[in-house]
Amino acid sequence: MFNPGKSWWKLLGVAILVYVITAGLLFEVPDLPVLRQSIRNIYFHVGMWFAMIFIMFLGVVFSIRYLATNNAAEDIRALAAVRTGIVFGILGLITGMLWARFTWGSFWVNDPKLNGAVVGLLAYLAYIVLRLSVEERDKRARLAAVYNVFAFVLYFLFIMILPRAASSSIHPGLDGNPALATGDLAPEMRIVFFPAMVGWMILAYWIFRLLSRAGHLEGKIAEHIENNYE
Amino acid sequence: MVFTAVTALIIKELRVEWRQKSAIAGILLYLAATMFTAFLAFEGLIGPREWNALFWLIMIFTSINAVLKSFIQESDARHLYYYTLVSPTEMIGAKIIYNALLMLVLGVFGFGVFMVFMGMPIGSPWLFFLNMIIGMTGFASVFTLVSAIASRAGGNFTLMAILGFPLVLPLLLLLTRVSAMCVSGTSFVLVSGDMLITVMLVIVSVILSVLLFPYIWRE
């Protein structure tokens, strides 16, 4: 059942997140105008995007591996990664909207960063719809992999050119990495912020692993039914 | 060798287009009708900013429509025949170049019609035109691969649109920005940076299309 030698990283992830949630809500934070206590959201909101980008990157690696090997297992992993990424993307949007409501006054503002987030989410939802519209398994896997690679590279370029197009963004982090630059974050927040990023990424990886194993099992069940009952 | 094959394929595309005039005629009429609808809806009351936004909105929908047919116009049997004759690189290269030409025709035609109905409040027309040429080439480069995917997946307009939109938005963002500057009047020095980035985006999507197309075409 539980094997500490193999699953130590899950324990580590849980420990980090317990620490992050407690410390994130209780530790001292600098009292800044407008932000006030909502500054604590940085541990959660930024973490969601970190986890999403990390898991989407993983997804593209699996898609490229699928195209190289034609191994159905890689396709299942890519799908699991995209599904996990979508969950974190939606959580990122929700945490961001709450934060925007308290600091900027409305849930949504017309800002290049926010629009960029929606574009990414739209592309991955389109990936899901593409998969739903193809019946044949190999063809579905191949088309999805091609789209994933094409979309990820173009999306990455989009994020890179955003700072240029965003001469008037009110979202922090014009260089593309909010809160990472050393001057940005107060020292007492760094001891929570950096573990938080690692913790959310571990959680995302864990969810991805579960989804991908569920995907393998579903594949096996489908195969079994095909072989025995049709 | 590559170039003769690509040229032959482009000429083939032109012939197919010429024989099935309905496709190109349909798309031109669609473009003109959409623009006339916009004219009626706005009753001609429109500022330069809205002019710019509306122009690009109409162009992007028309482009999706026009490129969608590039892989479903001909039968599967013919595609199989081409498969035995040319490499995937030559095929996608020819399709992108042909679609870029088609987009240019649409761009020039659309610009003309739009000018008639909505007026031309443009400060720097030549720069606007240059930006439009780059942009339409960009649409062709992104949409060609997407249309290959969509046609393999059943080939309906909705799928093509939802797959294509997120990918073309970076391009559209840059285009409308430069274009808005051109509308209010600008100089080449001011927009050259953005134009260069647009050109680079186009080059990247062409390279990606060439790399990825072989995986779609094989079957």
Image (cartoon, rainbow, N blue to C red):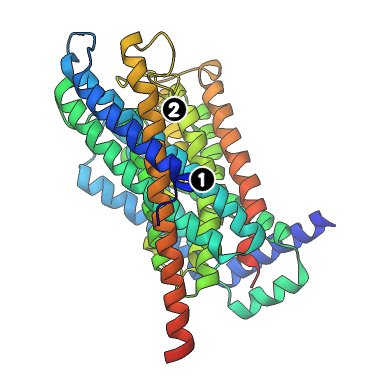
**Label 2: element kind:** helix
- The amino acid sitting under disc 1 is Leu
Residue A102, x across and y down, in percent: 14, 23
Identify the residue at horizontal 50%, vertical 52% (top origin). A148
Decide which of A178, A126 is in the foreground and name it.
Answer: A178
Residue B204, x across and y down, in percent: 61, 40
Q: CA distance from mark 1 to mark 2?
A: 23 Å
In this rendering, the answer to whether A94 lies above or below A75 is above
Q: Chain of mark 2?
A: A
Q: Which residue is mark 2?
A: A162
Q: Residue furthest right?
A: B1
Residue A88, x across and y down, in percent: 33, 42
In this rendering, the answer to whether B108 lies above or below A36 is below
Q: Is residue B63 visible?
A: yes
Decide which of B40, B51 is in the foreground and name it.
Answer: B51
Q: Which residue is mark 1?
A: A58
- Label 1 crowd bin: few (<14), some (14–19), many (20+), radius 10 Å: some
